[in-house]
Image (spheres, helix red, strand yellow):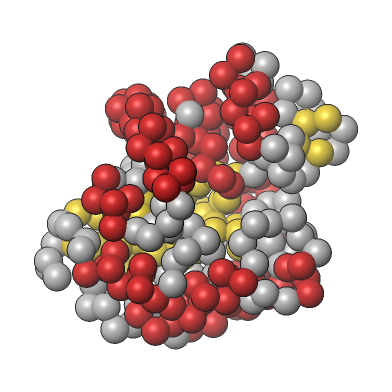
Amino acid sequence: MQSTNRLLLNADDFGLTPGVNRAIAELHTAGALPSATLMACGPAFQDAVHTAHSNPTLDIGCHVVLVDGTPSAQHVPTLATGNRLRDSLPRFILDLQRGCISEADIEEEATAQIRILQHGGLTITHIDTHKHTHLFPRVARSLLRAARACGVPAIRNPFEPAWSARLARGPLLRKLEVTALRTFQRTFYNLVHQHGIRTTDGTIGVSATGHLDSTNLVTLLHNLPPGTWELVCHPGYNDAALNAITTRLRATRDVEREALLAAIPACNIPLGTFADL
């Protein structure tokens, strides 16, 4: 493997359930997970904050939730109806593209979620979004403004490079979506540069979401080209608490946890965090 590789390994959904929080803590202790992004509106938020404080070397980001959750801001009428965000990603995308969702509401909601984590005594080094909604320029622009206002220096590059999508075993439809969404990649880079926020060369493992077993993980690691890449993952425990949550990732969280534990400490690739960018 190239000595110029650097891997930023980040677990999403910190705060979703106590089992997800426990898996993140266990992987971090084992040297298999340097960072995680925390959901301000997650059902297990308080447990996640306690876990983060108990693991001070765990890098913490904000996993901004704009769909399938509850709002943190008091008044974001184009994002939420009552106390619920849209529960459908396709509906969110359609309304976003139609101009029915205000960029000001997105910025206000992202700011509120980041501030909740900061008020919990956490240093937030980066942001990303639940279901990668900041692939779209109107969301990315709003998040970057929120990041600057809150002093958050980095954001996930949500675009998966062609080599990673090609190698990962996953649904063909997912790979086609990843390819099509690269249409927005240049705009994302321009926005990041304009706002003075840091990012990586790309995110790997997006096409493998729900299929990130040991074979997929090792294949991606062994083909990592020079650069700084983020590997996105969703480890956890498939337990009763997870069964009560709306998520398509259930048994695969156990699979990812075990794959990371086996492969990452032995991979010989320097691990970094967004704080290192």
- Residue placed furthest toward the top: 99
Is residue 174 shown left or right of residue 86? Answer: left
**Residue 182 visible to the viewer:** yes
Up the image or down, 99 lies above or below 259; here it is above
Question: Up-down: is 50 above or below 263?
Answer: above
Instruction: Give me the residue at 74% from left, 45% from top.
Output: 69
Residue 66 is drawn in which quadrant?
top right
Q: In which quarter of the image is residue 150?
A: top right
Q: Which of 250/101 is in front?
A: 250
Single out the residue that lies furthest toward the front. Answer: 172
Residue 21: percent from left, percent from top:
63, 72
Q: Is residue 277 visible?
A: no
* Residue sitting at the far right: 82
Q: In this view, does 159 lie to the left or right of 98?
A: left
- Seen from the viewer's position, the closer of residues 143 and 177 is 177
Residue 167 percent across, percent down from the top left: 28, 57
Q: Nearer the viewer, residue 271 or 159?
A: 159
Left or right: 80, with 238 as reference point: right
Task: Residue at 57%, 70% (x, y): give it.
Answer: 253
Q: Residue at image x 51%, y 42%?
A: 132
Q: How many labels does the image show?
A: 0
Residue 216 rendering spot, x and y as whole percentages: 36, 68
Residue at 64% x, 76% y is 237
Quadrant into which the N terminus falls? bottom left
As rendered, which of 166 and 114 lies closer to the eye? Answer: 166
Q: Position of residue 197 (x, y in %)?
A: 37, 38
